[in-house]
Image (spheres, helix red, strand yellow):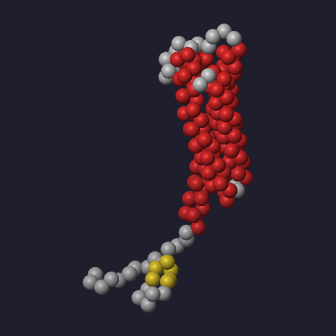
Amino acid sequence: MSVNELSAVLWRERELLELLTFKLEEEQLLLAAGRSRWVSHASREVEQVLERLRSTGLERAASSAEVAEEWGVAADAPLREVVAAAPSGPWGEILAAHLTAMVELTTQIGSLRDENDRFLRAAAQATEETLAGSVTGAATYDASGVSGAGSDGARLFEGTL
């Protein structure tokens, strides 16, 4: 693999990070609008993009390791160190631009994820409160199996008194 292939992998990863940003914003809009019917679909799409990012991340690691060794850096060096070791020429700037864009996108994704988590927690709490408020007095069953409201009066049970 060459530095050209590493750059191509980084482009694909950036595109996936942008797609993930879009999918998280889409999910956030659904949550904010109370359109819970579609949230599961949006969440599934987010998971699909994350899976593609995982495989692209592995591809990037392999490409980066090869370029790192070529440039005299440890194969397991982070991308930042590989970029710093780039020989003079355009590749250093190109890889640095990829790295900067990916850091910015990752920061945006973290913020969106946190906001969506807050929306989901608030929705879950509102649902719990609604369900708790909808339960009125509990009914009991009498000897014939008919449901009746519980009485607040005293009860006499066989064998007591």
Q: Residue at x 69, y 35 (%)?
A: 15
Q: From what the image shows, is residue 122 above or below residue 143?
A: above
**Occupied quadrant, residue 95:** top right
In this rendered view, identify the residue nearer to me: 85 or 124.
85
Can residue 121 be seen here? The reply is yes
Query: Hey, which residue is sitting farthest bottom in the picture?
Result: 144
Tell me the residue at 52%/73% (across/down).
Answer: 137
> Residue 110: horizontal and vertical position, in percent?
61, 35
Q: Residue at x 59, y 67 (%)?
A: 134
Q: Examine the rendering and report whether any part of residue 108 can be seen.
A: no
As drawn, the residue found furthest toward the top would be 88
Location of residue 118 in the rendering, given as x and y in whole percent from the top left corner: 61, 45
Is 56 in front, or is 159? 56
Residue drawn at (59%, 25%) of the image: 1
Q: Is residue 125 above or below residue 8?
A: below
Give the vertical position of 93 relative to 38 (above or below): above
In this view, the residue in front, 138 or 36, is 36
